Every structure is written in C-alpha cells, then in structure tokens.
Image: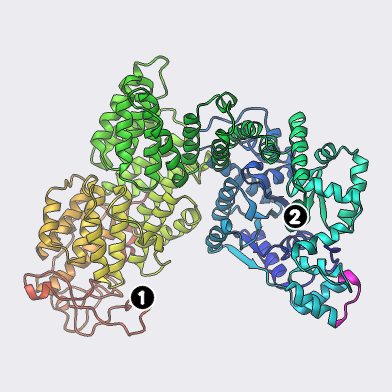
Amino acid sequence: MGPVSPVFAGRAAELAALRAAHDRARAGEAAAVLVAAEAGGGKSRLVEEFSRDVRAVTGGCLDLGAASLPYAPFTAILRRLGRDAVTALMPAAALPELARLMPALSGAAPPPDDGTGQMRLFEHVLTLAERLGAGEPVVLVVEDAHWADASTRDLLSFLLRNPPRPGVLLVVTFRPEEPATRAPFAELARLPHVTRLDLPPLTAAEVADQMRGILGAADHAAVRDVHARCGGNPLFVETLVAHPGEALPGTLRDLLLARVDRLPEPTRAALRAASAAGDRVGHALLAAVTGRTDAELSEALRPAVEHGLLTTGGDGYAFRHALIRDAVHDALLPGERTGLHRRYAETIERAPGLSDAPSGALAVHWEGCGDPAKALAAAWHAAGERREATAYAEQLTLLERVLALWDDVPDAAELTGRTRLRVLEDAAEAASAAGDPRRGLPLVRQALDGTDPARSPVEAARLLALRGMLRGFQGHDGELDDLREAARLAAASPPDRVKRLAHLASRLLVHGAMDEGERLGREALDLAAALAPAPRTGGLEFIVAAASARDGDGDTGPLERLLSRGLGAGERVRVLNTLAHARLNTGRAAEALALTGEGLAVAEDAGLAHSAGLAPAVNQVEALYRLGRWDEAAELLARRLDRHHGPAVRLQMMIWRIALLAARGTGPEPDPEALAVPLGAGPPQTVLPLAQMIVEWRLAEEDRPAARATADAVLRHPRLAVQPCYLWPLLEAIARAGGTDPAEIAALAARTPAATPVAAAHKAAVTALTGGPAGWDAVIRTWERLDLPYPLAQALFDAACADLATGRPPRSGSTAPPGSPRASAPRRWPGGSPNAPAAPGCPARRAGRSPPASRRWCGCWRAGAPTGRSPRNSSSPPRPPACTCRTSSPSSASRPGARPRPPPATAAWPKTGRRRA
C-alpha cells in the first residue's frame, strides 16, 4: 500500500454527474446517486472530492453483519449532526423513536412496538432529512452499503423510493460484485430519479496522472507496467508505486502486506490488534486492548496513517480499505487471533461504553475466542436490543446464532431464561416481523414438532397462529386452516382466545369471508368484555364495523360512528379508508375521493404518510380512475406508490398501472412480476382485480387468446364469489374477452349477489355481453344514476357498436333521472361536440346520430375506417378490427378481432356535469 495521490485522477464525468444531481436537488427535484465500483475502485475518493464543495454528512456500514449497530450509517449521521441540531429540527414526539438510533436524543423509552415501529422510525428519518435540506441543500452519504445489515438496506430502500426533498441528495456507495446487493441496487437504479455511476478502470493516461501526483514524475515505461499490472484500479496503483524498481509480490495479499511489513514493529502490532476489531475501532478501546497510553497508541499508529493504511475519523480509526484489514487479519497466527478476541471481549465486558454496539461485539469476540457460553449470552442480549431498535432481520440472525450455539452450552436455558422451543418461537416471530417467511417457516415447524397440543394447547395455538401469518405472506391457502385451529386450541384460555379470534377475524375479512369474520369478531368482543382487566378492543370494533359494511353492501353506520370517537391517527385512517372502499362500491366515487383525501391528510399530519397513508393512496388512485381523471391517477401513482418497497402495495400499484395502460394506451409496461402472480389462489381482493386489469390490457393489445387464458386461470379460484364487488367487474371483462362458455358465465352471474348499484350495473353489462344488444339500455340507465363517468362512457360506446351492428334505431335523450349529475349534462361523443359529423355512409349518420370520434372506431362504422394503433411494438400499419359486438346473427357474433377501446371518460362528459369531492 502506497501513499495517497494528492492529484484526483480521472473521474471527471462522474464528478460532473454528482454535481448535476446536487443541482437538481437544490432546484427541488428528487435526486439520488448510486456509486458502484469494485474493491479499491475509487468510490470513497470520488465522494470525498465531491463533498469538498457541498454540505455533506457521511455514515458508513461496517463488515460485522448482525453484530454491528443496527442502522449504523444513520446513527453515524445523527452523531455528526449532534443532539442539539436534531432536537431543534424534530418535534418532541419523534425523539423517543429516533433514540433507537441515538439514545442521547431522549431519556424517554421508545413507545412499544405494535408492528409499525420500524415504519414510524423510517418516517422520522425521512422527515429529518427533509428538514435538514429545507434551508440549505445537504448531501447524505452512505458508504459501503454492500456491508449494510438488512434493516439498514430496508431504510436505504425506503429513502430511495420516497426521496426527501427539496434540497436533499442521497449518495450511496457499494460494490456491485457482492451477491447481497447486486439485485436490490439494480432494482433501485431503475427509479426515475436515481442515477447509477459505475466507475470504470482508470485509463493509462489517468494512471499516469495518479503516479505523477505521488512521485512527482512518471516515465512512460513505468506507467505502462503499472497500468498493465493494476488493471486501472486506483488502490492497486498506489500499492504498486510503493515498490519502484523491485520485484513485485505475486499475490494481492502479499502485495498489500509488503507495505505493512516495512512499518515499525509497534505500528504492525497495533494494526494487528485493530484488525481483530473489524474495519473500524475506537481509540479508547484499542488503547485498552493493547495496554498503551493515548500518547503511545497515537505514536504507534501515526506511520500507518501517514502511509495511507489507516484513516482517522471521529474518535477512532478505520482501515483505508477492507482488503488491507482482511490481509492483516488473515495473517494473524491462530493463538494470536484468539488472544486478541479474548482481550476485546474482556475489555468491552468491563467497559461497555468503549464500543458502539457492546452486546453484538461481545457475541463476535467471545465466539472468536472459543467461549460458546459467553457468546450465546451476548448474542441473546444483542437480539433483545435489536428488537427494541425494530431491527428484526438482525434480531433473527442473532437468534439463529443462539440456536446454533445451544447444544454446546449445557446451561443455555438458564442463561436465556427460555426453553429452546421458546427461542425457536422468538426467532420465528422475528422472521414474521422482518417479512421473511422463507427463514421463519422452518423455525416454527421445529417448534411445532416439539409441542404437544394436548398438553400445551395455548402454546400450540400461538405457534399455529404464527405459522398461519407466515403462510399468509406467501399467499398459502393453509393460512386460514392454521388460524382456525389456533382459535380452537385457545378455547381454554379466554385472553388467548380473544387474540386468536381477532387475528382470524381480520384475515377472514381479507379473504372476503365477511359473515364469519363479523361473527367471530363479535364473539371476541363478548369474551373481552368479561375479562379483568379488560383489554383494548378498538381493533376488534373496527373488524366488526368493517365486516358489517360488507364492501358497501351492508351497514356503514358502525364505521361512521367510530369516526366520532377519539381515534388514534392510524385507526382513523383505517376507518376512513374502509368507508372510501364502501363508497366506491356504491358508485359514489367523489365521496370516496374526499374520504381518501382526509385519510391522507391525517396520515401526513401524524408522520405516517408512507405507512398508514398507503392504503388510502391506493383507493384514491381507484377513485380518480373511476372518475376518468387518469392523468391525476397516474401522477399519484408515480408520486406516492411507485417508490414504495412493500410487496403488497407494489402489487396494488401494478394493478392500477395496468388499468391505466389498458384505458389510456400509454404508460409503463406491466411489470413481469404482476403477470406472474398465480391467479388460482390468494386473497380475492387482490387476485380478482389483477386478473380483471390483465384481461382488459390484453384486449386493448388485441391479444384475445392471452386475455382468455387469464380468464380461464382466475375462474379456477376456489373463493371466486366471496366478494361480489371484485367478481362483477371481472365477469364483465371476461365476457368482453369471449371464449368462455356463455352458459358458465351466466350460471356464475346467477348465483352471485348484485346488491350494490355498481354490482347491478356490471351484472347488466354481463347480461348484455352474453345475451344480446337490448341489454345495453339497462346498463346505461344504471350507470347514469352513478358518479362514475368512465363506465358510463364505455357502456355508451358498447351500445353504439351494438346498434350499428344490428341496425337498431338509436336511443334518444338521456335516461338519467332529474337532478342526477348526468341529467343536466349534454350528451357528448368522445373527442367531439354533441353534433359531430359522422363518416359518409355510416348507419349512425342516417339515423341522426354522431359516431364516437375515438382513436379506435368500431369496425362496423364503415369499411376502412381508421382504428388507431396496431398491437404494441408492431411495425405493420394500423388496421380496422372486425366488429365483435354480439348480435342476433350467429355469424356476426363469432367474428374474430379485437373489441374497440372505449373512449376517455373525461371526453364523454363535460367537467361541469361532474360532482366534485
């Protein structure tokens, strides 16, 4: 390892890209930069050069895995900002949450985690970043993200997908070759506001600049030799330059150690001791471990700093590169390594304040010196700390370490105060909290294998409920079976029975089993009322009220009464969103839009916009879509949902992306992940709308076979008819696709209730699509009574096509009742005035009606009429599709071709005729 060049060689384009991103952030745009390069590739030097001229705060990740401090780079950023700066920027209520990262911020304990603690913490970090950048632009730098623990990666992903603005630039450095970060960062780099910089190797000219900066001069032959040997890696250039005129070591490890070997022995000994601590070590801790005074340690380490092996920062030292630390640590003799780990463990045990994460460090060092009992105890304590910090993935890793050490420690149960079965359960719960069923299911399976339901029914019930939750993450049909069995086993313990019933009832609502969910919710409420002390029942009351609403088909009074009570922000948002869902299903889209707006405002005021606020954001997109306000819906998708990392919200986002693509003909292509979702299982409230939108998109793409294949797949769903509000629009889309036996659709429609106005309208459309053109009168009458212009426009268009196909006389006037939002609005064909001229020879013109001036005309208007675009990515010219309107003629009913796209709703009715939220 050689001296650092004072000349910053190369990287001009990359430095310019960072400065351009900073300019965008200063202008109020979302901006982030991912800097990728191999080990020694110059990531840190580039960021250091960029940071000279901007306001930057840096935090780094450490190569200690779960044993490191959770959210380490953000803790470092908070410490560099200082307690006073953070408390001045953040409300007092946020400080106990942020104290999970920096305990000095608040003496109050963080609120107990109710499952939303991690998301609240993420919200507060986002708010802090935004307030930091409000006055003067700030750059937040996270170094070495390839070493980030899972919780840190989640927080990074959250900030990148929900970029703080204005005035905040997030810069993240990482190694692209690391398996743990390759896929996540590739996905994040696709976000529209994220720039990825892959640092290429230095050119020969740039290596020459670097060498001249170190040596003062560099001849052509030396440059050629160094460039050939180092491959353009800046770190290796420095190392090779340290050996001028000498035979060079053959391996990289030897190359790095050669410079270390030239240092004085006290320096080498201090470096060996530092390597056992990891990539970074505090001065006081290293002094205690080596037995040196502050002055002696400083004197010993000065040559390592001067020769570029160590860097200083804060109160400690860091190896300039992990490769250097690895080479030094790997060169330790076995006894030397064991002794150093023991000295670290004993020192931290005596003085925990010398380490940033004492419990995690103790677990590493006791295991490193071969003391499994102390390693287990330290890992157990560290796991508890990770849970308090909402770092569930790290808690899980530490509990897995406890389980791995268990058989080597005879008194493990005494050390932990737990049986091995309870530790398995704790680990499975951590996996559930981390959203990791792949690791959680084997753990809970082991615990169930060791539990006898006859002797320990309450414990078995708890484990079954946990397995049901983990199965639910995977969309496993066994979820409800586990939850029902858990509720049965808990019958002997009323408090546990209440918990199990509440869990089951809430999941039954997700799966559309409203009757059973309401019944079990009421049973749980009755049981809870008899307990002393009585538990909180707000969640149960919401479950019962939501079930009573029946997706708008029942009584929404209980939900409305809940709003009059003193609800917490999260509970209020949930009630408002459920009411909005009911309003959508009764055709009151403007009211739904107002309710979702109120829910979003409550969530934002409480700092929960990116957690509790996501569900109303999804319903707001749907309300805007139903109202035909597609540009607003697309903008909301991009602003609120397109950057969220949660899988459930991501799937909802995909559904409405596909819906907008099918309706507008423009937008992002459907995500392959959405198209790969199994349609024969899973919650109907997700699977059925997804299938509906895929069918509609396939039809818009003129790919009728693919639309029919989607229809066939979803019709095999075992709970197809449990929620009619999702089934009816799907049935209409399937009927529109054709191919499915009309008798099968008619039979399914006959046994599916259509109690809401929206369901009745879809039922009338299914009848019209499968039974003849006369049915469109009923469809139009139903939609005209509702506040949903897009479905009405679609029905009018379909009716016009049916009229033209059969020569039926035109309908005249509006059938909307007096006073309805449609009665006072002049009927307007999409894209034209009420009296737009028709094409010559068009039957509608002879009848005194104007055809839709749509991009996609019905093929029966006239031969050769323009019909809009061809299938996506086709190079062939547009062609008129044959009419697919059903008529009384068998031949016309079976014609091939694609059904025309309905016109935009905003063109079908003037804005003055629409109710506003």
Q: Which residue is mark 1?
A: 872
The residue shown at (58%, 25%) is: 411
Of all residues, the one furthest to the top in this rendering is: 532
Residue 55 is labelled as 2
The amino acid type of the residue labelled 1 equals Arg
Q: Determine whether label 1 and label 2 are within 8 Å by CB.
A: no
The residue shown at (86%, 47%) is: 269
What are the residue bounds of the magenta stretch?
A: 213-220
Residue 767's x, y, as percent? 13, 58
Q: Earlier in the sequence, mark 1 or mark 2?
A: 2
Element at label 2: loop
Q: Using residue 735 as the reference point, say whether residue 788 is left or right of it.
A: right
In the image, 276 versus 97, the foreground residue is: 276
Q: Can residue 217 be found in the magenta stretch?
A: yes
Q: Can residue 809 be found in the magenta stretch?
A: no
Question: Closer to the camera: disc 1 or disc 2?
Answer: 1
Q: Using residue 314 as the reference point, say whether residue 739 is left or right of it.
A: left
Residue 8 in view: no
Which picture quadrant has residue 671?
bottom left
In the image, 488 versus 672, the foreground residue is: 488
- Residue 779, relative to residue 359: is it above or below? below
The amino acid type of the residue labelled 2 equals Arg
Q: Tell me which colouring the rendered structure shows.
A: rainbow
Residue 398's x, y, as percent? 58, 39
Element at label 1: loop
Which picture quadrant has residue 737?
bottom left
